[in-house]
Image: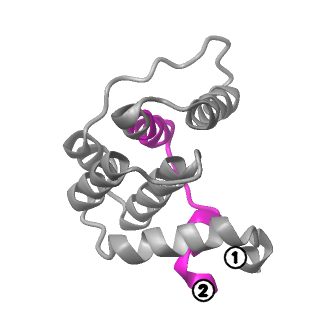
Amino acid sequence: MAHHDLAPLFTDLAISADDAEAIVAALRDIAETDGVHDEELALISEFVAALDADLGEETATHLEPMTPSKLAATITDPTLRSVAVMSCVLLAMADGNISDKERAKVVAYADALGVEGYDKIEADIVGWVKSGDLESIMN
């Protein structure tokens, strides 16, 4: 896999609190498509905790329900849209595989966000996760 395939995940991309919250809400929506697994719940909880820490919040953020069209209305930056889809694939992979229901939901988000090449994105992320070779992406 070429380094540029997943590069947006590892750049210093500016993201607003509203955008971050919207992406995390989309992750929860995907997790709920086939029943939330412990691994998925842990990832979502970590994202919410990190967001709250960055904002100096003492109480946990309440995530509003998210839909593909609502996320598309919130996230307008093309790079951030790609990062959102990649994050969705990573969340779907958290329990070791992407179910058909999860895939359909992630594809709905990708379509709404105008992110093309979903099959390649999924293949790149699955290959990277299964390789365990984080270093090759970071360099």
At a point 56% along the width and 37% down the height, the residue shown is 40
Judge from the rendering whether residue 69 lies leftward or rightward of residue 7; answer left or right. Answer: left
Q: Which residue is mark 1?
A: 137
Crowd tier of the residue under label 2, counting other residues whose Cα lies within 10 Å: few below 14, some 14–19, many 20 or above: few
Percent position of residue 26, x then y: 38, 39
**Image position of 62 with respect to 87: above or below:** above
Task: Pick whichever, 70 or 118, lies toward us.
Answer: 118
Q: Is any atom of residue 11 visible in this view?
A: no
- The magenta span reads 1-28
Instruction: Please state, as top left, top right, bottom left or bottom right, where the C terminus lies in the image.
Output: bottom right
Q: Please tell me whether the stretch drawn in magenta is mainly helix, strand or loop.
A: helix
Tell whether label 1 touches label 2 (CB within 8 Å).
Answer: yes
- Tell me, yes or no, whether the highlighted magenta stretch contains residue 37: no
Does residue 15 belong to the magenta stretch? yes
- Residue sitting at 45 percent across and 68 percent down? 122
Measure how far apart labels 2 and 1 are at the Cα level: 9 Å
Label 2 vs label 1, nearer the camera: 2
Provide the residue designation for mark 2: 1
Q: Is residue 1 left or right of residue 116?
A: right
Residue at 37% x, 61% y: name it.
77
Image quarter hosting the N terminus? bottom right
Label 2, secondary structure: give it: loop
How many numbered callouts?
Answer: 2
Q: Amino acid at mark 1?
A: Ile
Examine the image and state in which quarter residue 47 appears. Answer: top right
Residue type highlighted by circle 2: Met
The image quadrant of residue 125 is bottom right
